[in-house]
Image (spheres, rainbow, N blue to C red):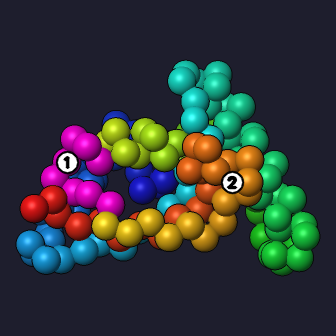
Amino acid sequence: YHHIEDKNKIEFLNTIQRHLTNDGVAIICDNFLPDYKNDTERDISVNLYYDELEKYYKSGNATERATELLKEVRNQDLQNIEEHKVSFMIFEEHLAKTSLKIDNDIIVWQPNMFKKDNAGSHVLVLAPRQ
């Protein structure tokens, strides 16, 4: 989802829904930014997200190479090149415009400071609304 340009996200979700049977599910692993209201706030959220992720990586949770690559990915996200993360709230707004619902939300990584916005890394099980 975060590799899909914002203008195409809802169509992407609709395409997933069209390919599911009534009892089918789609599993998505995605990363969500802290909430923001405009492009300037988004840049702040991107930097906050990657600052926390870098701390996590440097505390022994990733290789040195992965930590180095994080700088490149941050820059891509800030420039909206290949990385198009949004907040969980925006994801829910997109989902509300489709026939999908979150059946299960498994949080993989979420610093305490991100809990109020449900930001971080998630595995989401999406299912058709019945």
The relative height of residue 82 versus residue 28 in the rendered view (above or below) is above
98 sits to left or right of 83 = left
Density class for disc 1 (Cα within 10 Å; few <14, some 14-19, many ≥20) is some
Where the C terminus falls, by quadrant? bottom left
122 sits to left or right of 47 = left
25 sits to left or right of 35 = left
Task: Check residue 98 in the rendering and tell me which mark sits there, or answer none.
Answer: 1
Question: Residue shown at 67%/37% (left/top)?
Answer: 45
The magenta-colored residue range is: 95-102
User: Does the stretch in magenta take in 65?
Assistant: no
- Please count the marks in the image: 2
* Percent position of residue 111, x then y: 73, 57
2 sits to left or right of 100 = right
Q: Residue beneath label 2, please?
A: 73
Nearest the viewer among 18 and 100 is: 100
Label 1 is placed on what type of residue? Answer: Thr
Task: Check residue 108 in the rendering and tell me which mark sits there, or answer none.
Answer: none
Nearest the viewer among 78 and 54 is: 54
Element under label 2? helix
Mark 2, mark 1: which one is toward the viewer?
Answer: 1
Element under label 1? loop
Is residue 15 visible in the rendered structure shown here?
no
